[in-house]
């Protein structure tokens, strides 16, 4: 992203990106195109550069914003009907940091409504299509962001990852997708899904770009008390010797060609002198069950604020206040949003709290401990991102449990708060992209990104 070299203007880059966005309109990537705003910013940056001023580390770089980040440009809908017409009163800290360095948002990207899903088929605006096969899903929830980068419309896009929403669409579209350590990037100004799991991250084509974006956006934010003290830029790149593979994941659940891709990468690493360590992590098979209790519980709480009074859409023709709340929520949420609110309220209800929520919380602690033990035996772990590559549109959307199973290998990281980088791993015989993920201990983000260069 070396833009400020004066060989190409910001205006040229933005115009090209907007033209490509239109050329690929059948992929349904965008919920909003920021044409006037982006061109205006580009002109400002070109003037700055002409005056010889420092225009920032991302000067003139067009990017795409997942439509659950608040910023003044365009409504923030989270691809949910209930937020339609929701002008952002504030700007997300991550957006502020990107723009301070000269990045230019050319559009807002489609997602599963409120980031609930693994295919973007739960979006109010319909699904985004896979970059390599239009009959297949983009993955989700950050499907629009992933496809925008995979089709070279922009060099990077933002995402959020609560249970895999960056890593899975990245792997479905053959690019890099990073979920940092919990608390590394401020979530201020991002629509909350499940607050103990949500992370901000990026889609890029290279590890170098990922590193730059992490450097720009990470750091403590007084507006988000869950952010960690700054560590990213100052962390030492560690000397990696041992790579772990999880025995329990290398089984029948995983598609044969993904397993082959994993074996190939392990062979490369062995050839370069790394030791491969087999890990027994039986507790991980309970991560999905724990996730689908903790996450809906937090969703039920976070989504209770959408009442038709304060945000976006309001249902007309309601007789009284209660009916207005009911009708707004009924008409405004997608089926998947409602399913999660119901599950969440159920697992938190007094008769079931101990049986479900408390058990899930205890399981979460065991998962954290299991990873701690694993990282005593190895530096990083290499696993699949999801059990299968991009599936066909419509294949799973009417079967919520099949859709939830997509998240089997991505959610353990969110429960443990540890970083995961989805890396491209070639294509299967049908030309569908394959991905793997590198997993590290808390705060190993910089080393993880650096190490991924070994696997290109
Ligand atoms: N697919 C997962 C879910 O539906 C993860 C979503 C996310 O990370 N936002 O919960």
Image (cartoon, helix red, strand yellow):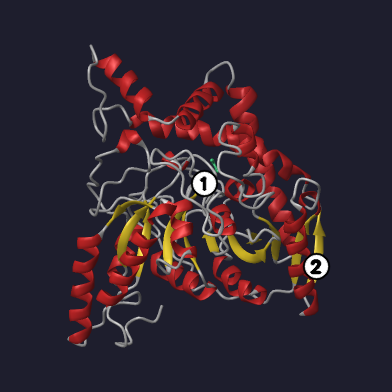
Residue 92 lies in quadrant: bottom left
Q: Is residue 326 above or below residue 197?
A: above
Position of the C terminus by quadrant:
bottom right
Marked residue nearer the N-terminal end (1 or 2): 1
Note whether ligand 1 is within 8 Å of mark 2: no
Marker disc for residue 162: 1
Residue 192 lies in quadrant: top left
**Given contact means CB atoms under 8 Å apart, are the residues at marks 1 and 2 in contact?**
no
Q: Is residue 88 above or below residue 260?
A: above
Where residue 373 appears, as percent x and y from the top left, is 74, 55
Marker disc for residue 245: none
Query: Mark 1 falls on what kind of element?
Result: loop
* Residue situated in front as seen by the camera: 37 or 285: 37
The residue positioned 27% from the left and 27% from the top of the image is 308
Where residue 196 appears, as percent x and y from the top left, is 50, 43
Where residue 10 appears, as percent x and y from the top left, is 27, 76
Position of the N terminus by quadrant:
bottom left
Using residue 368 as the reference point, say whether residue 283 is left or right of it.
right
**Crowding near the residue tagged with mark 1, few <14, some 14–19, many ≥20 C-alpha atoms within 10 Å:** many
Marker disc for residue 276: 2
Note whether ligand 1 is within 8 Å of mark 1: yes
Query: Mark 2 falls on what kind of element?
Result: strand
Where residue 179 appears, as percent x and y from the top left, is 53, 57
* Residue situated in front as seen by the camera: 305 or 249: 249
* Residue situated in front as seen by the camera: 330 or 183: 330
**Mark 1 and mark 2: span between their CA atoms?**
29 Å
The residue positioned 54% from the left and 72% from the top of the image is 207
Using residue 185 as the reference point, say whether residue 417 is left or right of it.
right
Residue 362 visible in the snapshot: no
Using residue 443 as the reference point, say whether residue 2 is left or right of it.
left
């Amino acid at each position: 992203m070396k833009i400020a070299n004066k060989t190409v203007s910001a205006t040229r880059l933005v115009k090209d990106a907007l033209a490509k966005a239109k050329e690929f309109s059948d992929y349904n990537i965008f919920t909003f195109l920021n044409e006037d705003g982006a061109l205006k910013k580009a002109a400002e940056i070109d003037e700055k550069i002409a005056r010889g001023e420092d225009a920032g580390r991302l000067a003139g770089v067009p990017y795409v914003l997942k439509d659950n980040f608040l910023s003044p440009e365009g409504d923030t809908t989270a691809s949910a009907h209930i937020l339609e017409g929701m002008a952002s009163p504030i700007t997300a800290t991550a957006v502020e940091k990107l723009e301070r360095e000269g990045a230019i948002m050319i559009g807002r990207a489609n997602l599963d409504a409120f980031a609930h899903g693994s295919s973007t088929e739960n979006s109010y605006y319909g699904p985004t299509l896979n970059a390599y096969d239009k009959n297949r899903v983009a993955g989700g929830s950050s499907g629009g962001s992933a496809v925008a980068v995979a089709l070279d419309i922009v060099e990077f896009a933002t995402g959020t990852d609560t249970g895999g929403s960056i890593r899975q669409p990245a792997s479905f579209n053959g690019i890099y997708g990073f979920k940092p350590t919990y608390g590394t990037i401020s979530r201020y100004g991002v629509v909350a899904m499940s607050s103990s799991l949500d992370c901000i991250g990026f889609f890029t084509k290279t590890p170098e770009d990922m590193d730059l974006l992490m450097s720009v956006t990470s750091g403590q934010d007084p507006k988000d008390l869950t952010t960690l003290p700054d560590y990213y830029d100052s962390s030492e790149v560690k000397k990696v010797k041992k790579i772990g593979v999880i025995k329990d994941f290398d089984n029948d659940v995983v598609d044969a060609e993904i397993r082959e891709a994993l074996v190939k990468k392990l062979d490369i690493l062995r050839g370069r002198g790394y030791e491969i360590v087999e890990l027994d992590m039986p507790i991980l098979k309970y991560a999905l069950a724990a996730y689908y209790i903790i996450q809906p519980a937090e969703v039920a709480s976070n989504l209770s604020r959408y009442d038709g009074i304060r945000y976006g859409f309001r249902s007309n023709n309601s007789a009284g206040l209660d009916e207005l709340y009911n009708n707004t929520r009924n008409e405004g949420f997608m089926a998947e949003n409602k399913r999660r609110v119901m599950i969440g309220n159920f697992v938190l209800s007094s008769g079931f709290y101990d049986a479900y929520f408390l058990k899930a919380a205890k399981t979460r602690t065991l998962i954290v401990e299991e990873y701690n033990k694993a990282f005593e035996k190895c530096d990083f772990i290499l696993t699949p991102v999801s059990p299968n590559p991009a599936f066909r549109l419509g294949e799973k959307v009417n079967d919520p449990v099949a859709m939830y199973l997509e998240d089997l290998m991505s959610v353990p990281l969110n429960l443990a708060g540890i970083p995961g980088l989805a890396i491209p791993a070639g294509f299967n015989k049908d030309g569908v992209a394959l991905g793997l993920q590198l997993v590290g201990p808390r705060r190993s983000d910089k080393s993880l990104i650096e190490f991924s260069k070994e696997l290109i």
